[in-house]
Amino acid sequence: MDLRAEVVVVESRDPVLNNALQLAFLDLKIRGTAYVPATKVQNRIHNFAIREKRENITGLQLADVVATPIGRHLIGKKTYPAHCEGGDFFATIEGKLRKDSRGQWDGFGPVVLPK
């Protein structure tokens, strides 16, 4: 087994969305992406698990804390202004995103699909 093999864990939604996630993962293993061949996906991701929210998995909670402000920013919504000194959690996360030499993260940080 490759020591760099990964497990992908996602949070359960409803049965229809869970099935869609399973199918998307199988498609990824079969076809890969425009940037990553299927064989590389197969060699690196050895398990795909859908877990219930009530399990309180630390990694999934952390992913929510980071992904939610990014997603809400990209669709033009503030994130929890009453609970953030700067008025928006995205302002905290934005400083951590990968940027180009001019300080722009578009094209270097989050990738928004479809384009």
Image (cartoon, helix red, strand yellow):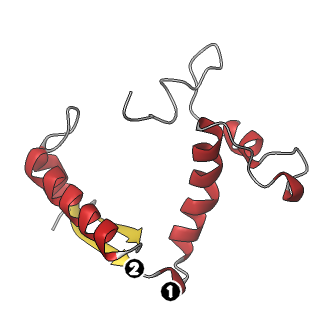
Q: Secondary structure at mark 1?
A: helix
Q: Residue at x 78, y 55 (%)?
A: 80
Q: Please name whichever residue, 74 or 64, is drawn nearer the observer in this view of the structure.
A: 74
* In the image: residue 53, left or right of residue 69: left
- Residue 43 picture location, percent across and down: 15, 56
Q: Amino acid at mark 2?
A: Arg
* In the image: residue 21, left or right of residue 11: left
Q: Residue at x 54, y 60 (%)?
A: 63
* In the image: residue 17, left or right of residue 75: left
Q: Please name whichever residue, 8 or 75, is drawn nearer the observer in this view of the structure.
A: 75
The single residue placed furthest to the right in the displayed view is 85
Q: Secondary structure at mark 2?
A: strand
User: Looking at the rendered structure, which numbered label has been put on residue 14?
Assistant: none
- Residue 65 picture location, percent across and down: 64, 60
Give the class, few, some or many, for how many residues have Cα within 10 Å of label 1's Cα (few <14, many ≥20). Answer: few
The answer for how far apart the CA atoms under marks 2 and 1 are is 7 Å
The single residue placed furthest to the bottom in the displayed view is 55
User: Looking at the rendered structure, which numbered label has been put on residue 51?
Assistant: 2
Q: Please name whichever residue, 40 or 22, is drawn nearer the observer in this view of the structure.
A: 22
* Residue bearing mark 1: 55
**The C terminus: image quadrant:** top left
Q: Are marks 2 and 1 in contact (CB under 8 Å)?
A: yes
- Residue 97 picture location, percent across and down: 60, 36
